[in-house]
Image (cartoon, rainbow, N blue to C red):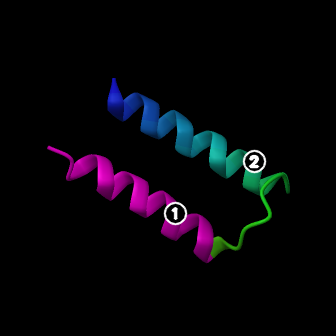
Amino acid sequence: MGAELLVGGLAQVLTSWLSGELALSETEIVEQCTDIFVGVATAP
C-alpha cells in the first residue's frame, strides 16, 4: 500500500508542478521527492 501511495502522490506532485500550481524549481521537486522516498525506504 505504501508504494501505491508514494507513486500516486508523486504523480500528483508532478501534475501540479507541470500545471504551475507548485512554485518550485525542478531541482527542488527532485530533492524533496527523493528525500521522501529515501525516508520511507529506510524507515524501520
Q: Nearer the viewer, mark 2 or mark 1?
A: 1
Q: Would you place residue 18 above or below residue 6 in this image?
A: below
Label at residue 2: none
Residue 36 in magenta?
yes
Label at residue 16: 2
Horizontally, is 37 left or right of 12 in the view? left
Total marks in image: 2
Residue extending farthest to the top is: 1
Q: CA distance from mark 2 to mark 1?
A: 14 Å
Amino acid type indicated by mark 1:
Gln
Residue 20 in magenta?
no
Q: Name the one closer to the observer, 40 or 15.
A: 40
Residue extending farthest to the right is: 20
Horizontally, is 20 left or right of 2 in the view? right
The residue that disc 1 covers is 32
The spot of residue 4 in percent (x, y) is 41, 29
Q: How crowded is the residue under tag 2: few (<14 C-alpha within 10 Å), some, or many (20+)? A: few
Q: Residue at x 41, y 54 (%)?
A: 36
Q: Residue at x 44, y 39 (%)?
A: 6
Which residues make up the magenta segment? 27-44
Q: Find residue 35 and report its image quarter.
A: bottom left
The spot of residue 43 in percent (x, y) is 21, 47
Q: How crowded is the residue under tag 1: few (<14 C-alpha within 10 Å), some, or many (20+)? A: few
Horizontally, is 16 left or right of 36 in the view? right
